[in-house]
Image (cartoon, rainbow, N blue to C red):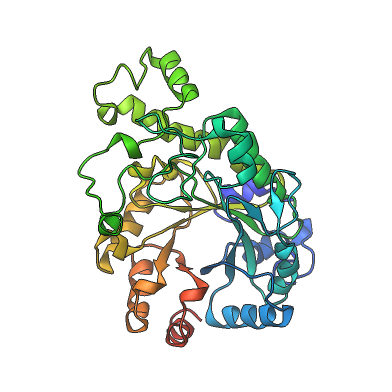
Amino acid sequence: MVTRRAVVKSGVAVAASSVLGLPAIHAADANASESARSLPKNWLWMRPSPRRPDDDWKRLFAKLKATGIDGVLPEVYNGSTAFFEHPNPLVETRANLLERIIPIAHSEGVQVHAWMWTVPCNNPRIVKQHGDWYAVNGKGEPANTKPAYVNYYKFLCPRLPEVREFIRGNVAALAAIDDLDGVHLDYVRLPDVILAKGLWAKYNIVQDREYPEYDYCYCENCRKEFKDETGIDPLKDLEDPSADEQWRQFRYDSVSGMVKGHLAPKAREHDKFVTAAVFPNWKFVRQAWHTWELDAYLPMLYHSFYNEDLTWIGEETRKALGRLVSPSPIYAGLFVSAIPPAELETAIRIAKDGGGSGISLFDEGALRDEHWQVLSKSLA
């Protein structure tokens, strides 16, 4: 039988044969069935409501498939509560929504990839019991008590063994769901040391350089590990930590080591696809995602955040493909609220001309009737 790793290396990842309601795949016909095991062509992020009736879900998935969107990314773990049966007593399960919608989506030919917040943790039990798990900025302020920008920016330290084990448990809980197609990692990074320029006015800031109050992580564990490696305490020994390439790389490695060494392997133990929502300005969130070797990447190419026009989407897609250490599909993330329906077809074409394998839309709630009409013409 063709193994998953062999298929990934050949450019095609394995998904369960039930995804599209097809017969079971046997060794004799595995190669002939590769098309049934591929990733979606186009994706939609969504914040699902457990109060939505099954009939409404069925109509939505049928509409998506007819429109040309064959993968959904429901937000089922928001850094605090879960919308699936979570085995960790620290995490509240609000509803078993994910388990309910998977068979409905599959019956309409739509894959389900569970969208989870990765590093931020706003769980009040963890804030109270494990305050030492949180990232610390260059002023010595922990993210749980003084988060940057907004209250939900309570980022954990991605290098701490206890944190890695907790986050790996979140991935494991999702990956263990039998018919789930994949695990989608979001916020798999550190806080923005420099925000996208289009957001500066919103927060009444000017970030002409890296300021310590937005620069993470200077927790005791990170400082000790870096000193053990280099002989340098980044907080005490560096006049300008932001200018030190070793210290910058250490933070890249903190995030990448967690993804490559703990999260992706745990998902793949259960034969799940692993994807991530990632930033184009990766250096400023310490997110060297081009090194992660995941099944696909969905860069959030929200052009309005960067004061750019639509052509920037294609440029960033090409840059992303050029950075990857191993080939994987790129699905350009489009911020629907900033794209009038009359410009959506152009945005899609630009993303594909840039080398994108498709698009991912943020999010379901932003789609108006006019958007749906354009999508039906452009994707189906």
In the figure, is residue 178 to the left or right of 126? Answer: right
Say which residue appears at 66% left-offset and 52% top-offset.
272
- As displayed, is residue 329 above or below residue 264? below
Q: Is residue 265 visible?
A: no
In the figure, is residue 94 to the left or right of 126? Answer: right
Residue lying furthest top in this view? 231
Q: Quadrant of residue 165?
A: top right
* Viewer-side residue, 51 vs 54: 51
Q: How many marks?
A: 0
Percent coordinates x, y for residue 56 in the rendering: 67, 82
Percent coordinates x, y for residue 324 in the rendering: 41, 46
Q: Is residue 371 visible?
A: yes
Q: Quadrant of residue 216?
A: top left
Say which residue appears at 39% left-offset and 39% top-offset.
286
Percent coordinates x, y for residue 137 in the rendering: 39, 33
Percent coordinates x, y for residue 229 in the rendering: 43, 16
- As displayed, is residue 229 above or below residue 310? above
Say which residue appears at 37% left-offset and 78% top-offset.
344
- As displayed, is residue 128 above or below residue 180? above
* Viewer-side residue, 344 vs 6: 344
Say which residue appears at 45% left-offset and 86% top-offset.
377
In the figure, is residue 344 to the left or right of 253? Answer: left
Residue lying furthest left in this view? 208
